[in-house]
Image (cartoon, helix red, strand yellow):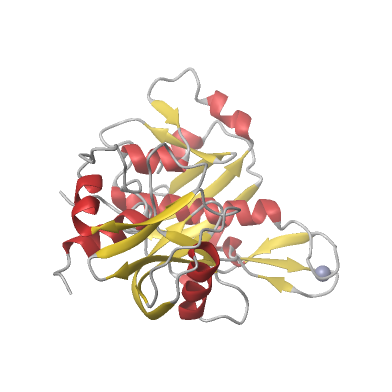
């Protein structure tokens, strides 16, 4: 079975037109409401097969006032909001074995919640994290307050409006005929090789970001760049934009500040890595990551 790209499915109807000042009060008054509770960085889940972080009013009734609230939208007609509570909130569920807490990477890697809920949790985490880090105005330094049901922060002192950010990252599989270029950073799991990647800079096209990053990190010149697919990556708020790029040169010059190694892999070797049968125990990126899907997409495509 083809692995599921982490955080890429979201069954929520976003309803941007409903993000008015009363949206959170309407959520609070609806007996059908669902609430996602983050205890610091991690959501509280009701255990099950699968588990779920969408909690009923009874399941959140013992919690105090949240630090931040965001109205997210609706799920099968039921309003959904996310609440940020202090990390110690997990202890309020600690004695009840029907609840658990986990970080988002583990939730995606182990498939604790349904795939359609992973995107919802990524959305909630990125928004709540943004609130936590933007309590003061970047323009004048005064305190800001949440507006538009949590999709904006306003500064009363200077009138500035601040919107949640998404940081675009170019991630690319560079190909050269039957070979593709992968690299590894020292922090990677032993034997794992992945796609090169980097933040897109202001005033830069996606295509040029791909060409710049590949040249900086591996000394390879890239020609054609084609968009493949994207992935929300809520650590804290990246959007991974996956591309397939054609190499114009093949002599690798590694930037040792960025990479521990980079090399060309033949399609046959990639197949062994994806199947976990490589003779040197080399591995492709984890199946929740877009790098895995870019490599798989290229490997399964017909030979050029
Ligand atoms: Zn201000």
Asked if residue 191 can be seen in this view, the reply is yes
Q: Nearer the viewer, residue 21 or 146?
A: 146
Q: Looking at the image, is 67 positioned above or below residue 137? A: above
Q: Nearer the viewer, residue 98 or 9?
A: 9
Q: Position of residue 120 (x, y in %)?
A: 41, 54
Which quarter is ligand 1 in? bottom right
Q: Position of residue 198 (x, y in %)?
A: 53, 63
In the current view of this chain or complex, which residue is farthest to the front? 251
Q: Nearer the viewer, residue 273 or 64?
A: 273
Q: Quadrant of residue 85?
A: top right
Q: Position of residue 232 (x, y in %)?
A: 44, 60
Q: Looking at the image, is 161 positioned above or below residue 51? A: below
Q: Nearer the viewer, residue 125 or 209?
A: 209
Residue drawn at 64 percent across, 36 percent down? 86
Q: Looking at the image, is 16 positioned above or below residue 9? A: below
Residue drawn at 63 percent across, 35 percent down? 64
Q: Quadrant of residue 88?
A: top right
Asked whether, in this view, residue 9 is left or right of residue 96, the answer is left
Residue drawn at 24 percent across, 58 percent down? 266
Q: Quadrant of the C terminus?
A: bottom left
Asked if residue 56 can be seen in this view, the reply is no
């Amino acid at each position: 079975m083809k692995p599921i790209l982490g955080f890429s499915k979201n069954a929520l109807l976003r309803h941007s037109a409903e993000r008015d000042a009363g949206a959170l009060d309407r959520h609070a008054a609806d007996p059908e409401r669902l609430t996602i509770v983050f205890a610091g960085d991690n959501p509280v889940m009701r255990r099950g097969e699968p588990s779920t972080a969408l909690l009923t009013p009874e399941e959140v009734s013992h919690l105090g006032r949240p630090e931040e609230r965001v109205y997210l939208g609706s799920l099968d007609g039921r309003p959904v909001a996310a609440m940020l509570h202090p990390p110690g909130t997990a202890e309020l569920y600690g004695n009840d074995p029907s609840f658990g807490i986990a970080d988002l990477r583990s939730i995606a890697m182990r498939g604790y919640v349904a795939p359609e809920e992973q995107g919802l949790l990524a959305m909630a985490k990125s928004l709540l994290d943004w609130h936590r880090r933007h309590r003061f105005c970047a323009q004048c330094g005064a305190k800001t307050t949440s507006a538009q049901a949590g999709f904006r922060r306003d500064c009363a002192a200077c009138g500035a409006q601040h919107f949640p950010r998404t940081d675009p990252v170019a991630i690319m599989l560079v190909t050269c005929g039957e070979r593709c270029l992968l690299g590894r950073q020292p922090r990677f799991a032993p034997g794992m090789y992945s796609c090169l990647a980097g933040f897109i800079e202001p005033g830069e096209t996606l295509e040029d970001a791909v060409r710049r990053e590949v040249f900086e990190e591996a000394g390879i010149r890239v020609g054609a760049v084609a968009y493949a697919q994207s992935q929300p990556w809520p650590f804290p708020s990246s959007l991974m934009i996956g591309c397939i790029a054609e190499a114009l040169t093949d002599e690798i010059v590694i930037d040792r500040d960025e990479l521990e190694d980079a090399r060309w892999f033949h399609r046959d070797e990639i197949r062994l890595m994806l199947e976990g049968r490589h003779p040197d125990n080399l591995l492709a990126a984890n199946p929740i990551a877009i790098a895995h899907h870019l490599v798989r997409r290229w490997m399964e495509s017909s030979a050029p």
